[in-house]
Structure formats: structure tokens, C-alpha cells
Amino acid sequence: MKDTPSKTRTRRTRTNLVHGGTKRSGWGELSEAMFLTQGFAYDSAEQAEARFQNAGPDEYIYARYGNPTVRMFEERIALLEGAEDGFATASGMAAVNGALVSMLKAGDHVVAARALFGSCLYILEEILPRYGVEVTLVDGTDLPAWEAAIRDDTRAVFFESMSNPTLEVIDIEAVAKLAHDRGATVIVDNVFSTPVYSDAIAQGADVVIYSATKHIDGQGRTLGGVILGTTEFIRKTVEPYMKHTGGSMSPFTAWVLLKGLETIDLRVRAQTGTAQALAERLSGHPALTRVIYPGLPTHAQHDLTRRQTGAGGTMLSFEVAGGKVAAFAVLNALEVILISNNLGDAKSIATHPATTTHQRLAPETREMLGIGDGLIRLSVGLEDQEDLAEDLLGALAIL
Ligand SMILES: *Cc1c(COP(=O)(O)O)cnc(C)c1O
């Protein structure tokens, strides 16, 4: 195995996304090889014994522990995020669960933002308390609420830096300072911010998580996830938990995601440009009661967004007057934009959170989180901006 990238000069992001982490076999293949193997043969019994005692960074034992294609993906995404190391997982949820459960034990306390992806909320509200971990949920944009909730026995704080579907932006630097003052680890689910715009580690996050299913794949093919952090945390805390409990990424998935990383910078910047333009065009539309996009000056955390990620991202939400009936009519009138619940895809996707992704929440909770019956979430894809604008404005015109 030879590492391709030069060791003598630091390369820039776009170059790392194409070449970072590449390992070539003796054949010198140009494209990353897909090592579809669970096991690895040893030259001798002595070598097998030595590898089980102390496997080096590019020595493999079993695919649940590590695999060359998966390792290429981990190294490339760690370079993009500016993290020391990463562990690739079977899905985004395996990453969220792995990061939390690997570091927590009975008696620990966790503070988390309330506006969370449904499955994240399930881990925090249902699973962790079953094992004796106490969880306090706060309004993530309310810094005094974080300050009041974080205690001396708080081991971790957890939040989505940009919330789903109301796109509230949480101040990573400010929350990290409060957490670090009490010795707590800061774990950020950064999916909506995207690795392209993330500077989360420099801003104070200790651990960053992505569902690679979203922008990293970007073409709707695979489930995957990654946990990024210090080498110490990834290798001493995360790896033992993941490799013994089975949530590792498959080599095939890693290969798809390596190809996704080659184009992620171009895709996410183009999608963000279109999202910004669509948000501006929808603002003030008479059929809408709200347009939520962190890149609009009207957004409550617009200044924070400019500091934290520098861009509003690929997601926007808007609320139609007329509740569920009007929202369904708009969704059903769309011709280019698909009705689905994935996000970060090359295809633009519209979602009605109240009846799908957030259906299980109690109506009062939905109301508290601002998820009204007229709210539509839009994941902006790579289609022509004019076609998307015509599709949206045409659908809104029926109201
Ligand atoms: C999709 C998503 C997840 C879960 O990822 P999967 O790959 O579907 O398991 C976690 N957090 C956020 C914010 C997400 O959008």
C-alpha cells in the first residue's frame, strides 16, 4: 500500500477531496479500489499473532475492525473536516449512537438541544435513560438555558448545528465554551451545515458527526455515517465500541462515498447558490407566511450563520397560508421537485414534516418547535435554478 499524497506540502481542500487518503495496491489502479473482503490472509502464524497484538495503521484483521477502502474514506473526510481521525459507520444513526454510547456510562448527565432529528431524539429520550444516563433537553438557541442546564457531572452536550426542519442555527463556539468550562465533551451533528461549510472543530466542537447518506453521497445511493474527532477519542473510545458492536461501514458504501467526496465541494456550493436565490425569490410571496433560510437577512441567526458557516446551506423551509390542505396542494402540483424525505441529494426534494418526518411528535411539541401544518421543507438539488423557480412559483400560484 502506497500513500499517494505528498508528505512535503499541505494541499488545499479541493485537491484533498480528489486525492486525500488514496491508497494504491501493487497494480497502481487510478480509481480507488473497492476491497470487497471481510478478511485478510497473513504470511505466517507469527504475523497473525503480531497483528492481533498490535495492528499498525494500514494493517487489517477483519472488515468490522477496518478495511482499506473504508480507511480511504475515513482519511479523506477527516482531511475535509480538519479532524485528526474518523471512524466510518453503517449509517448516520450508527454514528450518533456510537459517539454517545461509547463515551457514556450510568450516572452521567447529557444536555442536548430539543430540536433534533427524530431518531436522535429517540436515543436521547428513550435509550440513554434506560441505561441510567440522565438527559436534559434545552432550546438550543437559548444560551442562558444551556448555561443553567450544564452541570459539573455533565459528560457531553449534543446538538444539531442547524436544526431540522426549522433551520435554527446553534452557536457552536458559545455552547462549546459553556461545556468546556464544566469539562463536558461537545458532540455536534453537523449534517445541515455540511462538511463543505463546517469549521466546527476550530469553533470548539470535540466530535463532529455526519450522516454520509446526505450531502457526502449526494446522489441518494447509500446509507453511511462518520464520527470525527481526535485520534485519542476515535481510536480509544469510539473504535472499540464500534468494532465490537457491529455498526461499521461496508467497503462498497465507502467506495461510493469516496466518489461522493470527489464532487462534494462543487455540488454543495452550487446547491447553496440555488437555495439562496430561491429563498430570495420566495420571500414576500403572498401565498407564504414565512420563508426560513439562514442566508436571508430576516433569519434570526443570520449574523451567526455568516460567522459560523458563511453560507445558508442547501435546505430551505417555507410555510403556506392554509395549513395542511394548502401544503398538500402545493406538493402535489410540483412537477420537477420530488416528494420524499431524503436531503442533500442532486434531485430537489420537498417534504411535509408535520405528516412525515415529525409525525410522531405530539402536536404541542410540533407547535413548540415551529413545525406547523403549512410548513414545507425543501432540499435544493442540482437542477437548473429557473426550472426550480418556475416549479415552485407555479405550484404556489394554484393557492
Ligand atoms: C439523516 C440524519 C441523521 C441520520 O442519518 P442516517 O444516515 O439516515 O442514519 C442524523 N442526523 C441528521 C441531522 C440527519 O439529517
Image (cartoon, rainbow, N blue to C red):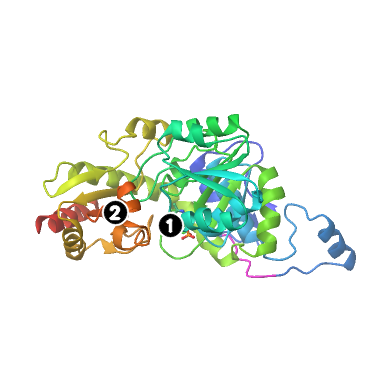
Q: Quarter holding the C terminus? A: bottom left
Q: Quarter holding the N terminus? A: bottom right
First in sequence, mark 1 or 2: give its number.
1
Q: Quadrant of residue 244?
A: bottom right
Residue 172 seen anywhere in this rendered image of the structure: no
Kind of residue indicated by mark 1: Gly
Residue at (54, 47) in percent of width and height: 135
In the rendered image, residue 363, in percent from the top left (x then y), is placed at 31, 56
In the rendered image, residue 226, in percent from the top left (x then y), is placed at 56, 53
Q: Quadrant of residue 70?
A: bottom right
For the image, the number of numbered tags is: 2
Which residue is nearer to you in this view: 225 or 50? 225
Tag of residue 387: none
Check the image and report above or below for 268 versus 153: below
Residue placed under numbered mark 1 in the picture: 118
**Element type at mark 1:** helix
Residue placed under numbered mark 2 in the picture: 378
Kind of residue indicated by mark 2: Leu
Tell me whether the residue at label 1 lies in contact with that at label 2, contact meaning CB atoms closer than 8 angstroms: no
| Category of crowding for the residue at label 1, using alpha-carbon neighbours closer than 10 angstroms: few (below 14), some (14–19), many (at least 20) | some
Check the image and report above or below for 212 versus 186: below
Which residue is nearer to you in this view: 53 or 183? 183
Does 373 appear in magenta? Answer: no
Magenta region:
32-38
Q: Is residue 58 left or right of residue 100?
A: right
User: How far is disc 1 from disc 2 in space, using C-alphas?
Assistant: 18 Å
| Category of crowding for the residue at label 2, using alpha-carbon neighbours closer than 10 angstroms: few (below 14), some (14–19), many (at least 20) | many
